[in-house]
Amino acid sequence: MFDVIESTRPTITHASGRNSPPMMEVRGLNLWYGDKHALIDVDFDLYSNEALAFIGPSGCGKSTALKCLNRMHDDTRDVTIEGSLVLEGEDIRHPDVDPPLLRRRFGWVAQKPNPFPSSIYNNVAYGARLHGLMRDRAELEDHVEACLKRAHLWDEVKDDLHRKAGTDLSGGQQQRLCIARALSTQPDVLLMDEPTGSIDPIATAKVEDLVMELKETKSIVIITHSMMQARRVADRVAYFHLGRLLEIGPTAAMFAGAETREARSFIEGQFG
Ligand SMILES: Nc1ncnc2c1ncn2[C@@H]1O[C@H](COP(=O)(O)OP(=O)(O)OP(=O)(O)O)[C@@H](O)[C@H]1O
Ligand SMILES: [Mg+2]
């Protein structure tokens, strides 16, 4: 359906030691909001079965970069994007790409839990219904159950899936519901923008456990302001600074001693 771009780059060794081609390759990514140059020559790869953390000071472009991966900027006025974003050999910005079909491959989890003003069931069923992924009602019901189980929410909600998602669940439950909803379209990649930024420590631990589990079968990009969280869940860390991706590397190496002074002082400052 889309153009296949021949990759001339060598296969890079994955953080975990496996040799595999990247699932997604981002090269020369630049983005302007009007005149403001918000992303400057950003390059990185994303592998299957890894969690990649975006870290860096506020306003350095982390969310902007994340939104490029599933073309979330498409509907924002006055945004200009240049560069190549290649998902399994296919240029996601090619005019033939159907954005809804592309977005199906990405789940999105925002900082503030944002369930639809509907039932728990409808929140999770929505994505699968929209894309016609299930053959009938029984299959959809099984799918909703499976997504809620994967998000570790099933046991807490199974007695009444028709409760209102927004008002009848705690913040942490709502965030796990949003993860279940994100899983509904059977995505390959989960994009999480500070997913624990507005929930309590116990709820945070549950979401981190989920990230650890889900990366066994998916790629995850997670933005976090918590260096401890990056250390706990990420295989690799990308440090953003004033719109540039300044340094990327395996989590242990980045925390043991990043190469750039900026990344080092940011990481150390976060502990100090
Ligand atoms: N819709 C927009 N229009 C104009 N400028 C924007 C828009 N969104 C973000 N920016 C600007 O782009 C830069 C990068 O913002 P971005 O939200 O990507 O940063 P961030 O690293 O995610 O920050 P934070 O850690 O605070 O969430 C900032 O200077 C921000 O003010
Ligand atoms: Mg942000």
Image: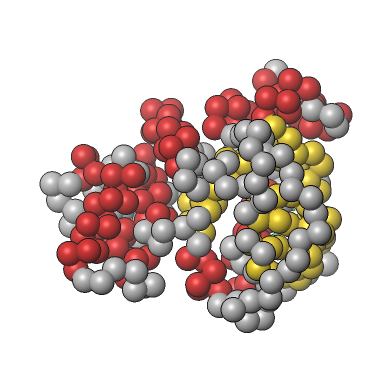
Quadrant for the C terminus, please.
top right
Figure check: 109 above or below 126 = above
As drawn, which residue projects farthest toward the top? 272
Relative to residue 167, is residue 30 drawn left or right? right
Most foreground residue, 165 or 209: 209
Badge count: 0
Residue drawn at 27 percent across, 57 percent down: 143
Can residue 117 be seen here? The reply is no
Question: Where does residue 238 sit, x and y in percent of width and height?
Answer: 71, 40
Quadrant for the N terminus, please. Answer: bottom right
Q: Which of 10 and 147 is in front in this view?
A: 10
Residue at figure coordinates x 22%, y 57% from the top left: 142
* Residue farthest to the left, as pictured: 159
Q: Position of residue 268 (x, y in %)?
A: 74, 22
Residue 88 appears in view:
yes
| In this rendering, position of residue 237 left or right of residue 233 | right
Question: Along the line of sight, which residue is nearer the eye, 157 or 94?
Answer: 94
On screen, residue 27 above or below 159: below
Q: Which residue is drawn at 39% across and 28% down?
A: 202
Toward which corner of the image does residue 247 lie, by quadrant?
top right
What colour-coding does the image apply?
Answer: secondary structure
Quarter of the rendered structure image containing ligand 1: bottom right
**Image location (x, y in percent) of residue 50:** 57, 41
Quadrant of the rendered image containing residue 261: top right
Residue 139 location in percent, x, y? 22, 63
Is 268 situated left or right of 96 in this image?
Answer: right
Give the farthest residue toward the bottom: 96
Which residue does the image show at 47% across and 46% down from the upper left?
Answer: 217
